[in-house]
Image: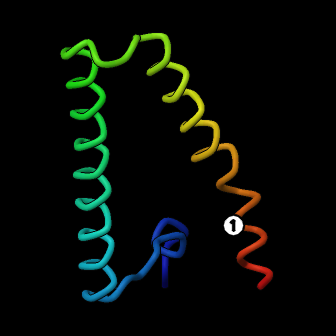
Amino acid sequence: MISKQQDKCINLSNSELTNVGIYSISHALIDGCCAAIIAANIALGKYDLGILSYYIVLYNIVAFALQAPVGLIVDKL
């Protein structure tokens, strides 16, 4: 008999788990690189903190607020 807890688990193959791990590490590295670029620009005084803050907020709106609508559109293709 399968418990209710086990029934809710997602069963992934080894290759799928490997892919999830690779994608997760890649995502973390890209986020780290972006953060380093932003920090370097602030430290070097290349851009005003206000302008960088604007672009960070704009990025977050585009990346996260549009994620669901774009996903729905792509799923329907």
| Identity of the residue drawn at 32% across and 56% down | 27
Q: Residues within 10 Å of mark 1 (few under 14, many from 20)?
A: few
Query: In the structure shown, which secondary structural element does the residue marked by tag 1 occupy?
Result: helix
Measuring 20% from the left and 25% from the top, which residue is drawn there?
Answer: 40
Kindly identify the residue that appears in the image at 68 percent across and 43 percent down: 65
69 left or right of 24 in image: right
Q: Quadrant of the C terminus?
A: bottom right
Q: Going by the image, does 12 lie left or right of 45?
A: right
Q: Amino acid at mark 1?
A: Gly
Residue that extends furthest to the front in the rendered view of this protein: 46
The number of numbered discs placed on residues in the rendered structure image is 1
Q: Quadrant of residue 71?
A: bottom right
Q: Position of residue 41 (x, y in %)?
A: 26, 23
Q: Position of residue 32 (x, y in %)?
A: 24, 41
User: Is 63 or 12 nearer to us in this picture?
Assistant: 63
Front residue of this view, candidates 5 and 29? 29
Residue 73 to residue 47: above or below: below
Q: How is the image coloured?
A: rainbow
**Does residue 39 appear left or right of residue 53 in this picture?**
left
**Which percent across, then down, holds residue 54?**
55, 21
The answer to whether residue 65 is above or below residue 44 is below
Q: Is the residue 31 above or below the residue 53 in the image?
A: below
Q: Residue at x 22, y 52 (%)?
A: 29
Q: Quadrant of residue 76?
A: bottom right
Rendered location of residue 62, percent (x, y): 63, 44
* Residue topped by disc 1: 71
